[in-house]
């Protein structure tokens, strides 16, 4: 991302919000869009180069698509980083039938 583009981050907040609201969340098994509107979110159809003859629409749509790809990249990287942090506190253990173990229950 160029320095000029990095100063324009606020222009992309609606795209980030749309992405968040239409992405499936494992915690509630729905998208936020479904929670609020009681229906699945509309599909995002990917733009294909040359679908419009209008240069402004072409440029804006291509930038939107590239921003969506950038958001996907950063979200996946953050997920990977969170998984690495969580895995640091886990240990691989195996038990046999009949072994006694301490069990910590949480509500």
Image: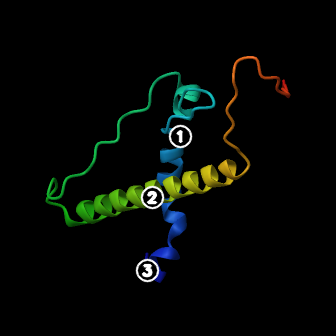
- Contact between marks 1 and 2 (CB within 8 A): the answer is no
Q: Which residue is mark 1?
A: 21
Q: Secondary structure at mark 2?
A: helix
Given residues 21 and 25, the one toward you in this image is: 25
Q: Which mark identifies residue 35?
A: none
Q: Which residue is mark 2?
A: 73
Disc with the residue nearer the chain's start (1 vs 2): 1
Place residue 40 in its image quadrant: top left
Q: Which residue is mark 3?
A: 2
Query: Which quadrant holds the N terminus?
Result: bottom left
Disc with the residue nearer the chain's start (3 vs 1): 3
Return the residue found at the far bottom.
3
Residue at left offset 54%, top offset 49%: 17
Given residues 8 and 77, the one toward you in this image is: 77
Residue at left offset 30%, top offset 58%: 61
- The 10 Å Cα crowd at callout 2, few under 14, some 14 to 19, many 20 or more, is few
């Amino acid at each position: 991302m160029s320095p000029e583009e990095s100063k324009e981050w606020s222009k992309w907040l609606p795209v980030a919000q749309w992405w968040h609201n239409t992405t499936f969340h494992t915690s509630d098994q729905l998208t936020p869009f479904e929670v609020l509107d009681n229906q699945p979110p509309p599909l995002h159809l990917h733009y294909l180069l040359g679908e419009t003859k209008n240069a402004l629409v072409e440029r804006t749509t291509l930038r939107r698509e590239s921003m969506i790809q950038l958001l996907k990249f950063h979200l996946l990287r953050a997920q990977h980083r969170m998984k690495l942090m969580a895995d640091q506190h886990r240990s691989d253990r195996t038990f046999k039938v009949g072994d006694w173990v301490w069990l910590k229950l949480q509500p």
